[in-house]
Each structure stands twice: as C-alpha cells, then as structure tokens.
Amino acid sequence: MSTSTPSAVTTPVTDGACRVLLRNGLIYAPRVGPANALLVQGKQIEWIGELAEGEEPTAPIDEVIDLAGALVTPGFCDAHVHLTMTGQGLDGVDLSGTTSIAQALRLVEDAARRGRGRPIYAHSWDETRWVEQRPVTSAELDRATYGGVVYMPRVDAHSASVSTAMATVARVRDLDGWDGTGVARREAFAAVTHAFTSTVTAAMHARYLDLALEAAARHGITLLHETGADHLTSHDDLKAVLGAGQVDGVPDVVAYWGELVADVETARAQADYLGVLGLAGDLCADGSFGSFTAHVTQPYLAAPASGDGQHVPSVGQDCGYGYLTVEEVRDHAVACTQAGLQAGGHVIGDAALRTMAEGFAAAAEIVGVEAIRAARHRWEHVELPDSKVLATMADLGIWASVQPMFDALWGGREGMYAVRLGQERALAAIPLRDMVDAGVRIVLGSDSPITPFGPWAAVRAAAWHHNPDQRLTVAEAVEAHTGAGYALAGREGGVLHAGAPATFVVWDDGTGLPVPTDPRTSLPVLESAHHRLPVARHTMIAGITAYRRSSTTAHTTRKTHL
C-alpha cells in the first residue's frame, strides 16, 4: 500500500456526505504519481493513491466502485462554445455529411414536410465538399420548402444561404454582404441571424440549452467557455446560458461577450450587467477562411462564388476583411485591463493578427506590460500567426484559444485551407508547436457547433496535426484541454489531487473494456489520426453525476450514489 492511504486521512466526515472509493482503475493525476484508486467525499476528492489487490481501506466507506481497469481523468474544458447554437444544431438539420446540393436539399425538404411550415435551421454545410462547388440559392430553398423560412449557416458560421422568405424578413436586400442569389455574409449574415433567432420561443431556447449541456456531459466536458457577441446572439441568451450552467449536476459555464469598448466605465458596467469574465470571445477582428472573410496578407487563391455559380470575382483580388483598427484594439485592451477584465477577440488571418498584436502592444505602453499580463487576455482561433505575433503574445501573456479539429477537418495539402490559401500557408495554420515553444499558453476547444463536442478528437488532432512540425504530445494536448481551460477562466479544477473538486470522468473503449494506455503517461495511446477514441462512461461534477452510460461492466458494492 502507498504511504498515503485512505486510513491516514484526518479530514472529518461531513454529516450526510457520501464517501465513495473508486478502485481498480488507472487514475491520471500527474501531481500525485501512479494511482489506481480515488476517494471522494461529498464535493471533493479526499485521497488519490494506490491500493494493492485485496487491500481494504480502514477509513469508513459508504460505497465502493470497481472501475474494472477504466481510465479516470479530470473533466475537460471546452474553451470556445456557442451553447444555444449547439443545442439548436442538435435539434436541427445537420448537413455536415452531405456531398452535394441535391442531397442537402432533400434533407431540407424532409424537414419542411415534418415541420409543417415552421422555420428550418439547417447547418454545417461546406460547399467545398459538394460536387457543385457552390452554395445553395434562395430559389432552390424556396422550391424545396414550398416558400418556407430557411436559415442555413455555413459550417464556419460566417455566412449563410437563406430562402426568399428569410431574406425578406431580415431585410437584407441593401445590406453589405448580400450577393443577390441567397448567400449572406458580413452585415447581411448578422441580419439574417438575428431575424432567425427572434423566432425562437422560450420553450425552444430551454430545450436547446438542455440538449447542449447534456451533450457536453456525455463527452466528458465539465466546464464550458461561452463566447457570445451581438452578431450571433443576444444579452438575454447569454444570461440564460449562464443560468443554465449554474444548476448542480451540469457542466459549469463561464461567459465572454464580444463587444468593443473604449473606456473603463463602459467596460465595467457591461461586464457587471452580463456577468461575464471579459469582453472577448467573438469580438470579430476578421472572419473565416471558409467564407473568404478572414483578413489575410496574401490574396485568396479562389474567390467566393454566388449561389448561382455565375458571379465570380477575379481570382487574387480578395484579402478578406479587417473589422478593427489598431487604435480600437488598443483602447479596448486598455479599458478592459483597467476594469480587471479579460480582453480579446476572434482573430484568424495573419493581417488581422498583426492588427491585434500592434493594438495590444500599444495598450501595454499605456498601462504597463505587467498589468496586461495579469489580466490573462485571450485571442480566439489564432490560425496564421507569424513569429512576431507569437512573440508579442508571449511577452504580454496573451492566451490562444485554439481548435485543433479545424486542422483535422480543413487543413493539410488537400483540404479547404489549401484551396483557399495554398499548401504552404495551409500547413502553417494553427501552429500549435510554434505557439507552445514561443511561450504562448494555449487552451483547446471545439467552437461548437462549428465542430462537435469531442475533447479526445481534439487531443488526437493536436497530436496528429497535418504538419508534423506542429504536433503536440498527448499529455500537452490533454493539459491544454483540462487544467489550462480552468486556469484561464480563473476556476478551480481540471486536475486531480486531494482537496480538488470531485470533478472527473471515467473512460473506457465504449464496450466496458479498458482503454489502451501508454505506461509512461497513463494516457490513451493515439497511434494515428484515425485511432479509436475513449468513450465516457461516467461524468462527475462536484460530486454529482452529470452523465452515466447505461451499460458498463463496472460494478458497485453498497448503495450507489455515483
């Protein structure tokens, strides 16, 4: 038996608190060392260590759970999500697997028949995966739905195809970004998004949040960073998201709101009103590669096509859009720093990243480098940073909230990024190893619903980046997806040790059998970009079960509370 055992614990038992011993597993707790057992009392972990086979602790135990070789890790943190949109997507028409416009339209038509006139939310299409290589038109959606209201956001949520009825309600005809055939970008996209979300009832909204939080727990996610902004959602939605995440037994939620401010009073008042950690998240410095709106220094190799495929601007004329100036970024960073808030924004292209870096450097000249560092500012996505940008981020303590699945889905020599940017720049996107080596702290997320919840898929993507020079170790990726996300949010958790919250996940291979692990790290072996991933058996949040899979080979003695 290890020198520190449950029998040596002197913490008094709280009246009514259940003491549960999980044993015969593999506990991932680098701070503790090798461990096969974990003792929980109430909301906290009381002890972690090793118990020999047949050994029984002398401390009072209410129940014992045999893990049957399962892996236990800290709960994961998804550092960039849109919860209501995620739930809406789970309840809507998923087009992510479609390979043609005809296939997508059949799914939309089926939804129209089932919905009997209700507005249709069809999402996650990618025209680069369609044989037609163009978006859907309003006319096609009108025919498929008999003139219905259809809101059809692209997979990156920076553009959408809409039906005529949707375009009419949103009044997009004269707005910037409306292409005339049914595709909305920039200002027009914000207009159709707001018009569609206004149709969501309170009951529908509650259902979407329930679906999203249930899905997060099912994937072993115990903390979520909601990243809202007025082009995507509303103040009321943000407050509802925060409220939903305060219920016992569901993943915890912290929030950021993407709003530009220029003075400390406005920053503090808005953050207090909304209950957010910062004015960051999806404050857009630019857009996305997929919608041709990320601000880049070199023109896109392809050009955006209208829905009819006819109006195609000259190749090489478009470098995307920069939505913020250096001065705006500077004033925003100063105001948030002085208000004790995290500042940041959505920033993808190299041109936009340079604007952000110059703005934050200018802010540091006003308030001081140490004040900037202490604020833990964060940038979302950070896909094409150069060495100078990374050096600025490291010097100023700016965190990068990144999504490895973007590379897995769209990176490499033949993916959408290569089509938009060229192979060399596609392989330079999302440079995880460069970030870590430069001293930039990173956290991982999904940007759900842009990519679905799946922390082990993100870990695998980070370990098997298309560019071998940019790969992380599995241990580095797990830390960035657990403890780092908690630290960035200023929350306790993301690590397992005595005294930590009883927030953890039990994993197996989905059939009850143990996950193959590396004996050097106690983490899953991920031998390829397609290696089978662990499946959550049981998600515990502060001592309360948030999810438990219905079938498992593990067994419990005494009364079960987990």
Image (cartoon, rainbow, N blue to C red):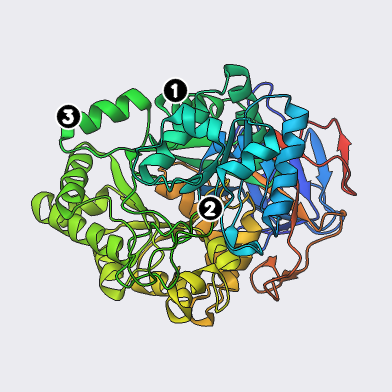
Query: Which residue does the numbered mark 2 point to in the structure image?
Result: 307
Secondary structure of the residue carrying tag 3 is: helix
Query: Considering only vertical position in the picture, is 503 above or below 117?
Result: below
Q: Which percent across, then down, holds residue 396?
A: 24, 59
Instruction: Residue 35: name its quadrant.
Output: bottom right
The answer to whether residue 508 shows anywhere in this view is yes
The answer to whether residue 30 shows anywhere in this view is no
Q: Choose between 325 and 319: the one closer to the eye.
A: 319
Query: Which residue does the numbered mark 3 point to in the structure image?
Result: 265
Hey, what amino acid is under mark 3? Glu
Query: Which residue does the numbered mark 1 point to in the structure image?
Result: 236
Secondary structure of the residue carrying tag 1 is: helix
Residues at marks 1 and 2 touching, judged by CB atoms closer than 8 Å: no
Q: Nearer the viewer, mark 3 or mark 2?
A: 2
| Distance in Å between CA atoms under marks 3 and 2 | 45 Å
* Image quadrant where one finds the C terminus: top right
